[in-house]
Each structure stands twice: as C-alpha cells, then as structure tokens.
Image (spheres, helix red, strand yellow):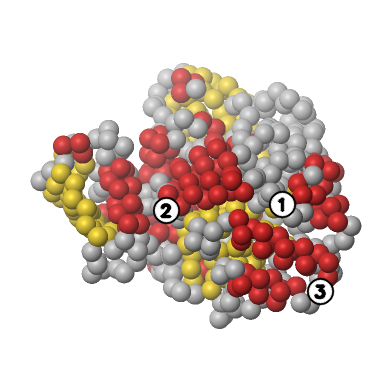
C-alpha cells in the first residue's frame, strides 16, 4: 500500500524534542513526479491561516476580520440555487457583523452548513470567525463500512459511530450484515436461518424493526444505509440450515425469497440500494444466479451493488471495487481498493487514506460515484469494542471524510507507505492535516479513549540504515521498513536512530513494537517470547543501554509463523488485546537532561511479514 541534513522537531509534549539525520547528508530518494507534480487536496494557505480546525476543510474559504459568539448571532437560512455548484449537498456560509447567512440548494446543504458552523464555534465554546465559505463535495458517495455478519455489533454501538462520522459529512453507511457465521437478518419465511444451530460466534441477529430504526436514524443524519445481503459466497451458515449451497438451483430460489422479504420489510425510499456481495464464491453457482438476482432487485425498484472482482453482472449494477485497478469501464463505480482499515498498521492508516485518490480520478462523476472506507474484523472478537480498539475506525474515518469530500488531485502511492520528505508539497499538506486531526481528537473524541489513538507523525525524524549500509531519512511514529528498503531479505535488519532532547531528568512512557497483524486474521508472529521485543531478535536501546520489553501477559501466544489463518480454528479464538503495540501498557524509561539517543534494530523475518517498527513517547502525567 531527499532530506535535511539536520532537523529538530518539537513533539507535542513539553520539554522533549526528536532529532534526526544529524550531520548526515542524504540525497533525495523521491521521484520528480512526487515532488513536482503533487497537488494538495485543499487550499493550503487558507487552511494554515484558519482560526479553527475544520474537517473536511471547505473547498473555498476567505477569512475576514472579526468574530462573534454564536448564540448572539442572527442566523438566516435560505434554500435557493447556488451559482458555484448544483450538488444537493453544496452550501455557502457567510459570517459578518454578527450575521450568519446560510444558503443551499437543498436541505442536505443546509445541514452541512450547520456542521461547519458547529466546528467554527467548536460546539459553542468559541466565537465564530468572520468568513465566506463556498463548499461542495467532490464525490457523491462518501462512506464507511462494518462487517457485523462476522462479529455482531449492537444497534446503539453502530448508531454512536454513525453519529460521530456523519458530523464529518460522510453520507453512507455500508452495513455488511450477513457473512459465514450467520444470516443476521430476521427471516420470517425461513426462521431456520435465525436458529442458533445455524450460527456460530454468536446467535444474535437484527430484527426488521431494528434495521428500520437504524436506517431511519441514519437518514435523519443525512446518511444512506446500504445493506449487504452477501450471496452466494460468504455463507457457511446456509448449508447448515438447508443442506445445500446458496448457488444451487434450490439455494438461488431461497436467495430470491430473502431479497423479496427484505424489500417487503424495508421501504425502497429509505434503502434504494441493496448490495448482494457476489465475491469470493467457493462453491458451484448456477449460471442464472446473477440474472435472476438482478431481475428480483429491479422488480422491487432497487439498485443492485456487487463487489468487483466477483461474479460478472450487467452494468445496471453498481460495482464496488475492492482490488486495485479492477475498475471496469461502462459501470458506475464505488471504490474501496486500498481502503481497508484492518490491513494497515494502525498509524499508517491515516496517511494511506490521505494519499489515496478515490476511483483514480480527481473529482467524481456519474460513473465515479465515490468511495467507502471498510473495516473487516474476520477474527472472532471477545467484545464488540475490540473492533474499534484494534482498528483506526475514527482516525481513518475522519481522514476519509477529508479526502472523499475534497477529492485528491494527484494522491501518491509512495506516500501511502511513508511520510513525505520535509520541504515537499506533500509533507506540507499532510503535516497541516495532522494538526487538524489531532485538534479534533482532543476536541471531540476525548470520551472514547483508546478508540481514537493518534500522535503527530511528521515531526518524528529518523536516520535509517538498511541491510547494505544505505542511509535514508524516515519520518513517523510507524516506519514500514519495506518501503524504505524493498530489497531486504530474510534475517536482515534495518537500524533506526533518533535523538530526544529533554529539558530535565525525567521518566516517560515508551510505546514501541514490531510485527503487526492485519486483524482480519492472525497473520503475524504472535506475542513475543518472555524478555524479547519480538521473535526475530529486534532490539531497542536508550543511550546505549537495552530497553527491556513489556512483561508479556501471554508470552509466545498466537504464533502462526506468518501464515493466513482464514478457515483455521484459531480464527474462532476470540481476539483480545493481543498485546498490540498501541493497546498494551507502555514501558517506563528514564530520560536524562540533554540529548538521549534511541536506536532500534528491526529484523525482517519473512517476505510476508509486515516489516515495521513503531515508537512514540508519552508524558506520565497525561495518563
């Protein structure tokens, strides 16, 4: 998925500085395309001059002098055609002399103007600054996704996530509601599908009343719900219930009945799109399956949606791309390729989404509809909160809102894996965005704790030395080392060096780790052995002395030798904290007054391994 010879970067906490690449002149390694042709997704000078952190940042904004308490302002709202955009989500916002004037093409635009106004006042905590904003989305579909077929999430928990992300102008919730463990939709015609004997992991399902309630709740927030009734693959529950597969002649008829019942229960005006999956089918399927399903959807006035790659369908269906470069001409497309939160290292997810170009185009169209950020939690979880604790749903979701709203003129494949070098337009843009993201974390997500973990990455600078002695600059809390040293082989190591300047002798908390699983499976080396940072010989030193790893709660657990665990019994061992580096208790270390040298040796064990290291420091009093 070039550098300065000397850089001093202040961290967010008082008295500590990171220093990288001291007295080392490193030639640029970034192509001309990345440095000369990259175009930021927003007006950077306007964002840098903004008196408030806005996400997504408006397409056009002019800041003026003056500010007024919102409760003292006169607010005028008008629905009328806007000259700059015909989008129903477009709006203009003018704040001047204590008057807030909102104009929009549609009620949706009025709602979004209100969301921007809330951020301008920080939910009423600050006066609103004078400005003129003209804003409209680059893409009509801007969504996020949960798989509750594999791991059930309650309606209140889903509502909480929808409420928070709708505040960032995401307008679609893709609800992957059925999967191998069970048909988690009430079924009146075939109640056997709701029989606990046909399910595993949990026996929970959603009643039609609950589904209608969630859809109504979402619609009220301007969010459409796309329910996915996954068929004929991802359906291990089906033969348990009926004795034959979904793709068989008999199974196809039941699928048609299931679609019909759903359409009878859920009004078309509240859920006009039904996703039927149709990918990763591992059992025979009759050739009439897709035409019959398409006809059934049309009969009920629904637009169908399918995964691509998957079973071929007509271009009446919306294709939902999950594989890079799989977009087909002649189809309406929604993009999720490279947008899986669970496949990234936790911290890398934000930059991976930020530098993604949805649908491979700068702006949306009737054919390039938009993008959906997906979270897949294939491994069983011990508690529904594990889904958000293990995956950056909020941090990546807010970033997706920024990019899906503004579009991405160029994006960058390279910078999806590494922080750009200082001095480039890409670095300036991402650094500015990080500042806004952290501001929103502090302002609006203080109550979710470990469900939103993110630290400023652009200011953490490393000198990296590869297996052949090559030296480059790296940046970030998380370093994906294959991106810097793509030719490294098994059992070779990279050496990462930075310096911390402290104004006093002090104890701090060190978060660090290696070897991250993808969370859709336990595809990693497991919990390290006792007294080791990982299984492969990686080490951390502070001022030349070894830093002891945490006291592992389950040393050596979940060791799978970098193999996929799909369809393996270990997938059903409930995922707990797994002692992932962003979840476990940090290690206390002592910094001396002055310069402190951190050196990390990160050993590569396998070409399939996520070869990485992560490192950040936290003040003790912040806990």
Disc 2, SS: loop
Mark 3 touches mark 2? (CB < 8 Å) = no
Q: Is residue 431 visible?
A: no
As displayed, is residue 107 above or below residue 499? below
Residue with the mark numbered 3? 286
C-alpha separation, residue under disc 3 versus residue under disc 1: 26 Å
Label 3 vs label 1, nearer the camera:
1
Disc 3, SS: loop
Q: Position of residue 298 (x, y in %)?
A: 60, 73
Which mark is drawn over residue 188? 1
Q: Position of residue 458 (x, y in %)?
A: 44, 46
Label 1 vs label 2, nearer the camera:
1
Left or right: 388 in relation to 237? left
Q: Looking at the image, which residue is at 73% across and 44% down? A: 379
Which mark is drawn over residue 456? none
Residue with the mark numbered 2? 222
Q: Which of 158 and 132 lies nearest the eye of the viewer? A: 158
Around disc 3, counting alpha carbons within 10 Å, would you say few (fewer than 14), some (14 to 19), or many (20 or more)?
A: few
Left or right: 132 in relation to 55? left
Q: Looking at the image, which residue is at 38% across and 35% down? A: 443
Q: Earlier in the sequence, mark 1 or mark 2?
A: 1
Q: Which of 391 and 312 lies nearest the eye of the viewer? A: 312
Taking the view exactly as shown, the residue that stands out farthest to the left is 97
Q: Which of 275 and 468 lies nearest the eye of the viewer? A: 275
Mark 1 touches mark 2? (CB < 8 Å) = no
Q: Which of 517 and 465 lies nearest the eye of the viewer? A: 517
Q: Looking at the image, which residue is at 66% across and 63% down? A: 260
Around disc 1, counting alpha carbons within 10 Å, would you say few (fewer than 14), some (14 to 19), or many (20 or more)?
A: few
């Amino acid at each position: 998925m070039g550098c300065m010879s000397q850089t001093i970067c202040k961290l967010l906490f008082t008295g500590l500085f990171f220093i990288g690449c001291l007295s080392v002149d490193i030639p640029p390694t970034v192509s001309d395309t990345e440095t000369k042709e990259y175009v930021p997704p927003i007006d950077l000078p306007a964002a840098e001059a903004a008196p408030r952190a806005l996400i997504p940042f408006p397409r056009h904004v002019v800041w003026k002098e003056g500010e007024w308490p919102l409760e003292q302002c006169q607010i005028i709202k008008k629905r009328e055609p806007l000259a700059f955009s015909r989008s129903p989500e477009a709006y203009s916002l003018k704040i001047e002399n204590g008057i807030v004037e909102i104009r929009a093409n549609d009620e949706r635009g009025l709602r979004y103007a209100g969301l921007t106004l809330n951020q301008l006042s920080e939910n009423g905590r600050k006066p609103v600054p004078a400005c003129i904003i003209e804003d409209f989305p680059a893409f009509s579909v801007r969504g996020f996704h949960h798989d509750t077929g594999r791991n059930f999430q309650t309606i209140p928990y889903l509502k909480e996530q929808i409420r928070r992300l709708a505040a960032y102008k995401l307008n679609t919730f893709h609800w992957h509601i059925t999967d191998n463990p069970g048909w988690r939709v009430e079924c009146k015609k075939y109640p056997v599908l709701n029989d606990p004997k046909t399910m595993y992991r949990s026996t929970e399902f959603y009643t039609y009343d609950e589904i209608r309630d969630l859809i109504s709740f979402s619609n009220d927030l301007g969010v459409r719900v796309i329910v996915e009734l996954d068929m004929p693959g991802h359906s291990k529950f089906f033969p348990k219930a009926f004795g034959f597969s979904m793709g068989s002649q008999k199974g196809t008829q039941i699928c048609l009945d299931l679609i019909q019942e759903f359409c009878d229960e859920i009004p078309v005006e509240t859920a006009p799109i039904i996703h039927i999956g149709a990918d990763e089918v591992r059992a025979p399927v009759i050739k009439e399956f897709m035409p019959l399903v398409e006809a059934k959807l049309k009969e009920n006035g629904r637009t169908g949606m399918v995964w691509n790659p998957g079973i071929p369908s007509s271009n009446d269906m919306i294709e939902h791309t999950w594989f890079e470069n799989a977009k087909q001409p002649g189809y309406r497309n929604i993009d999720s390729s490279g947008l899986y939160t669970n496949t990234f290292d936790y911290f890398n997810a934000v930059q991976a989404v930020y530098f993604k170009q949805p649908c491979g185009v700068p702006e949306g169209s009737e054919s390039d509809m938009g993008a959906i950020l997906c979270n897949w939690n294939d491994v069983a979880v011990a508690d529904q909160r594990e889904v958000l604790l293990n995956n950056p749903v909020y941090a990546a979701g807010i970033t997706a809102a920024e990019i899906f709203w503004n579009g991405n003129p160029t994006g960058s494949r390279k910078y999806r894996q590494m922080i750009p070098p200082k001095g480039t337009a890409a670095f300036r843009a991402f650094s500015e965005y990080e500042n806004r993201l952290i501001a929103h974390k502090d302002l609006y997500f203080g109550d979710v704790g470990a469900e939103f973990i993110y630290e400023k990455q652009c200011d953490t600078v490393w000198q990296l030395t590869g297996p052949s002695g090559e030296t480059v600059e790296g940046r970030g809390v998380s370093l994906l080392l294959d991106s810097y040293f793509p030719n490294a082989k098994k059992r070779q190591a990279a050496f990462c060096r930075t310096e911390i300047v402290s104004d006093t002798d002090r104890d701090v908390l060190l978060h660090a780790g290696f070897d991250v699983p993808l969370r859709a499976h336990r595809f990693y080396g497991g919990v390290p052995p006792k007294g080791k940072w990982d299984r492969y010989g990686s080490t951390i030193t502070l001022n030349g002395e070894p830093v002891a790893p945490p006291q592992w709660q389950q040393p050596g657990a979940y060791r799978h030798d970098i193999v996929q665990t799909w369809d393996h019994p270990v997938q059903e061992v409930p995922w707990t904290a797994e002692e992932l580096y962003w979840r476990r208790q940090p290690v206390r270390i002592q910094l001396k007054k002055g310069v402190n040298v951190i050196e990390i040796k990160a050993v590569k064990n396998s070409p399939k391994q996520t070869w990485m290291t992560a490192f950040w420091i936290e003040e003790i009093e912040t806990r």
